[in-house]
Image (cartoon, grey):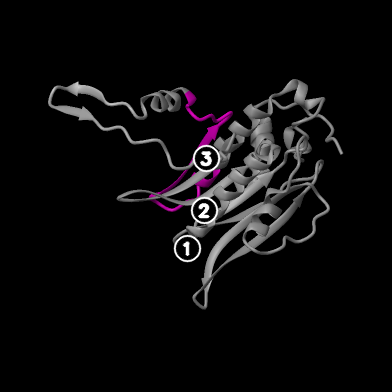
Amino acid sequence: MAWEDFAVLLDHFHPPLSEQRDWHGFHNAWATYLSADLNRTLPERWFAQPHVEFGVEIDVATMEEAESLRGETTEVDPTRAVWVPPAPTMTISLPFIADIVEVQVFRQSGGRILVGAIELVSPANNDRPETREAFVAKCESLLCAGIGLVVVDIVTSRHASLHEELVDRLGCTANASSSQLYAVAYRPVQRDEEPSADLWENELHLGRPLPSMPLYLKGGTLAMVDLQSTYQRTCEEQRIPHLPARE
């Protein structure tokens, strides 16, 4: 039986599927197929590409090496010394994004200009307050730069509504939702010289098809993000078994 007969959202984070397929591979492939689907319809000089990094870590070794040099003067030339800054006046906690699974859309105009992004939420993004803060801060910076955004969360193992946290950070309250899974599109727009954002909120449910989402690209172009067909293609290409969705 063809996969289109089972074209519904599955639980990739619990058995039995999580024991047969790795969600990392699925998210990676889904970002690739989302990019390919967008590239079939984007105007000339606009293009989409996946950007996936799991377990992102700061280069501690490099930082510690720099720390050991602080306050020292290293001679590299008899007539000139390398300047090393003094100790910092303050040290603060810096949240960083543990996983990045996204599709970036660019417009080629002299150089690459980021005009849109699709963020696929990972368990690590939902994990701790600091990783949630980093994810939400990234989304806020995209919107404040006028970059269109779509956030998709199909994570069933660790839930925290990053959408609600983002809306709260922007000074509003998200609509009540009965589902922990969601897809939301955000369109930065300016009306009457006042910046604002239009939102398209969609609840996602296991065992049901996925919606299409509007991605408003900076510069006025609208792209359709076909979550359903790209999800289906990913399941087909990854040979995801036909398993009943976990409720």
* Classed neighbour count for the residue bearing mark 1: other residues with Cα under 10 Å, few (<14), some (14–19), many (≥20): few
Residue 142 — which label?
2
**Which is in the foreground here, disc 2 or disc 3?**
2
**With respect to residue 238, does 88 lie above or below?**
below
Q: Answer with left or right where residue 176 lies relative to residue 101.
A: right
What is the residue that sits farthest to the right in this orientation?
247
Q: Answer with left or right where residue 101 lies relative to residue 163.
A: left
**With respect to residue 217, does 160 lie above or below?**
above
Q: Residue 204 at what x, y percent from top left?
A: 76, 48
* Classed neighbour count for the residue bearing mark 2: other residues with Cα under 10 Å, few (<14), some (14–19), many (≥20): some
**Which is in the foreground here, disc 2 or disc 1?**
2
Whether the magenta-drawn stretch holds residue 52 is answered as yes
The local secondary structure at tag 2 comes to helix
Q: Where the N terminus falls, by quadrant? A: top right
Whether the magenta-drawn stretch holds residue 47 is answered as yes
Residue placed under numbered mark 3 in the picture: 36
Magenta segment boundaries in residue numbering: 37-60
* Classed neighbour count for the residue bearing mark 3: other residues with Cα under 10 Å, few (<14), some (14–19), many (≥20): some
Q: CA distance from mark 1 to mark 3?
A: 21 Å
Which quadrant of the view contains residue 19?
Answer: top right
Residue 35 — which label?
none
Quick check: can you spot residue 222? Answer: no
**Cβ–Cβ below 8 Å for labels 1 and 3?**
no
Q: Residue 185 at what x, y percent from top left?
A: 63, 56
Q: CA distance from mark 2 to mark 3?
A: 22 Å
Residue kind at label 2, given as amino acid type: Leu
The local secondary structure at tag 1 comes to loop
Q: Residue 48 at what x, y percent from top left?
A: 48, 44
Which quadrant of the view contains residue 235?
Answer: top right
Residue kind at label 1, given as amino acid type: Gly
Residue 220 — which label?
1
